[in-house]
Image (tube, rainbow, N blue to C red):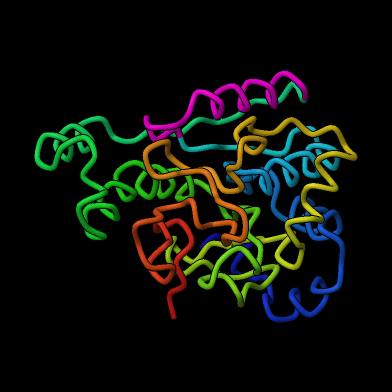
């Protein structure tokens, strides 16, 4: 971890920021770490944070992972955000040789066959590109929320990400609800993925995301063939 991030007292910062607004958390993060901090954008929560970040600092850095298996609506959303804010979005792609080997060995839809296969696919298409990006940063920003999944119920506003080189991880809307996210999106006219209007509250790769039925958990459409306890792709894994 860089000297700037290493000198931050994470426990003290969390005590200070726990009751602060997302904008106040982001202001602290950007003033402390820009340009060595970037937002990882994928879903509705993330685009709300993107809007906040760019209003605080129009040069705030945004990146996203193109796994090669995304929905057309996801690519359209990326372009709408770029056009609205006039920002550069840093696109990270999987290593083509690793993806080729995986598909040749296991097939195109290997992820349906086992959790091991699914995690390998996520590793190649998401985790490795994320590692490459984070290796150049002191901190990253997410749109994670505590009520999204059983794997995220204990989530600080600022933490040390032990899974990715002990850089800082900032979660400005950790204490927000699903309703607060959408109130912000609508009141600020934030561009979002059209699939959200078609019953997809959580969107990942096309083969691994389905419509959520009434009464289901908001992440029920992600890797729906697995148990809830395994439903992380490796981007947000707690290491103790």
- Start-end of magenta stretch: 66-84
Q: Quadrant of the C terminus?
A: bottom left
Q: Is residue 54 left or right of residue 92?
A: right
Q: Residue at x 34, y 57 (%)?
A: 225
Q: Residue at x 37, y 30 (%)?
A: 68
Q: Residue at x 21, y 57 (%)?
A: 114
Q: Is residue 6 left or right of residue 227?
A: right
Q: Residue 116: where, in percent of width, then height?
A: 22, 59
Numbered circles on residues, count? 0
Is residue 141 positioned above or below 186 on the image?
below
Q: Main secondary structure of the magenta part?
A: helix
- Magenta stretch containing residue 73, yes or no? yes
Q: Is residue 107 left or right of residue 93?
A: left
Q: Nearer the viewer, residue 99 or 208?
A: 208
Is residue 188 positioned above or below 213 on the image?
above
The single residue placed furthest to the left in the displayed view is 105
Q: Nearer the viewer, residue 191 or 56?
A: 191
Q: Residue 93: where, in percent of width, then height?
A: 39, 32
Is residue 230 positioned above or below 24 on the image?
below
Q: Residue at x 49, y 51 (%)?
A: 221
Q: Residue 115: where, in percent of width, then height?
A: 26, 60
Is residue 201 positioned above or below 81 on the image?
below
- Magenta stretch containing residue 36, yes or no? no
């Amino acid at each position: 971890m860089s000297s700037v991030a290493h000198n931050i007292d994470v426990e003290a910062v969390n005590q200070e920021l726990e009751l602060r607004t997302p904008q106040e958390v982001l202001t602290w993060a950007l003033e402390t770490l820009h340009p060595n901090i970037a937002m990882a954008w994928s879903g509705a929560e993330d685009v709300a944070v993107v809007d906040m970040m760019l209003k605080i600092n129009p040069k705030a850095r945004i990146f996203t992972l193109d796994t090669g298996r995304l929905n057309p609506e996801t690519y359209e959303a990326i372009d709408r955000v770029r056009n609205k804010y006039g920002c550069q979005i840093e696109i990270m792609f999987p290593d083509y040789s690793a993806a080729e080997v995986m598909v040749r060995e296991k097939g195109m839809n290997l992820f349906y066959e086992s959790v091991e296969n699914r995690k390998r696919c996520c590793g190649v298409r998401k985790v490795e590109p994320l590692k490459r990006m984070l290796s150049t940063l002191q901190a990253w920003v997410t749109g994670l929320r505590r009520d999204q999944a059983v794997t995220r119920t204990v989530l600080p506003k600022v933490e040390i990400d032990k899974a990715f080189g002990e850089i800082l991880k900032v979660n400005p809307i950790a204490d927000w609800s699903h309703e607060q996210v959408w109130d912000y999106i609508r009141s600020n006219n934030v561009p979002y993925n059209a699939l959200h209007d078609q019953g997809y509250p959580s969107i990942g790769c096309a083969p691994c995301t389905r419509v959520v039925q009434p009464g289901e958990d908001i992440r029920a459409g992600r890797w729906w063939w697995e148990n809830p306890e395994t439903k992380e792709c490796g981007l947000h894994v707690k290491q103790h």
